Image (cartoon, rainbow, N blue to C red):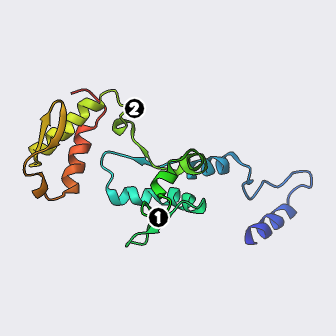
């Protein structure tokens, strides 16, 4: 209200022919259209993104799916997750074409270097990742060109920091 009154009084002192400059951006301005497009853009999962960060990134997508009757559940931390144990499996339902059309633009996407279809050196990066894990004490062996758990795999303590450090180091989208 103050802005409107200021604009009104400011217009009283000037020449009658001169229009007052606009005080508020139009709702149809390009910046408002661009901000709407940005708000619907999917977040990008980078090589150093933690599981907790991914879950937070997924919240707009999960909310959209919930609004379209896809089974969800609330985690201990109060965040939404897909409910795979429901009568209708939420994970399967979320991947169906009608749900992809309704909410797919909100689903977090892999960075190009993590995406096997977009990274021409993905196989090389994947080998580098597993080699890094082995260098850091993870019991993995390469058998017939595939990485498989070694004999002490079950004794391994999960370490997201180590795993993310190896992933960030290995998945650079370059050969070597």
Q: Is residue 38 above or below residue 65?
A: above
Q: Quadrant of residue 132?
A: top left
Q: In front of the other: label 2 or label 1?
A: 1
Q: Quadrant of the N terminus?
A: bottom right
Locate residue 173 relative to residue 150 in the image: left or right. Answer: right
* Residue farthest right in this picture: 16
Residue found 31% across the figure and 45% down from its top: 47
Residue visible at 26% across and 31% down? 123
The image position of residue 69, as x and y in percent, is 58, 61
Along the horizontal axis of the image, is 17 left or right of 39? right
SS at circle 1: loop
Q: Position of residue 147 (x, y in %)?
A: 18, 38
**Which residue is rendered at x = 45% and y = 62% of the image?**
83
* Contact flag, marks 2 and 1 (Cβ < 8 Å): no
Q: Position of residue 37 (x, y in %)?
A: 60, 47
Q: Give the residue at mark 1.
A: 86
Residue 160: x and y in percent read 23, 56
- Going from N to C along the chain, the mark reached first, 2 or 1, is 1
- Disc 2 and disc 1: Cα gap in Å? 31 Å
Residue 115 circle label = none
Numbered marks: total? 2
| Residue that label 2 marks | 117
Callout 1: 10 Å neighbours few (<14), some, many (20+)? Answer: few
Write the residue at 37% across / 73% down. Answer: 76
Residue 68 vs residue 22, the one in the foreground: 68
Mark 2 neighbour class, 10 Å CA radius: few under 14, some 14 to 19, many 20 or more: few
Quadrant showing the C terminus: top left
Q: Nearer the viewer, residue 18 or 119?
A: 119
In this image, 126 relative to 44: left or right? Answer: left
Asked where in the image residue 75 lies, by quadrant, the reply is: bottom left
Which of the pair 152/157 is nearer the observer? 152
Which structural element holds mark 2? loop
């Amino acid at each position: 209200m103050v802005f409107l009154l200021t604009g009104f009084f400011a217009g009283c002192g000037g020449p009658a022919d001169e229009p007052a400059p606009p005080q508020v951006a139009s709702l149809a301005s390009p910046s408002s259209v661009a901000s709407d497009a940005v708000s619907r853009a999917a977040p990008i999962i980078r090589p150093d993104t933690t599981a907790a960060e991914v879950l937070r990134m997924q919240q707009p997508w999960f909310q959209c799916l919930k609004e379209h009757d896809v089974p969800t559940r609330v985690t201990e931390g109060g965040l939404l997750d897909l409910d795979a144990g429901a009568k209708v499996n939420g994970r399967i339902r979320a991947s169906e074409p009608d749900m992809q059309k309704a909410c797919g633009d909100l689903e977090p996407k892999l960075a190009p270097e993590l995406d096997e279809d977009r990274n021409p050196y993905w196989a090389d990066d994947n080998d580098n990742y597993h080699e890094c894990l082995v260098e850091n004490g993870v019991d993995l062996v390469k058998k017939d060109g595939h990485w498989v758990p070694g004999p002490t795999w079950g004794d391994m303590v999960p370490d997201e920091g180590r795993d993310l450090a190896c992933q960030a180091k290995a998945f650079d989208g370059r050969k070597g």
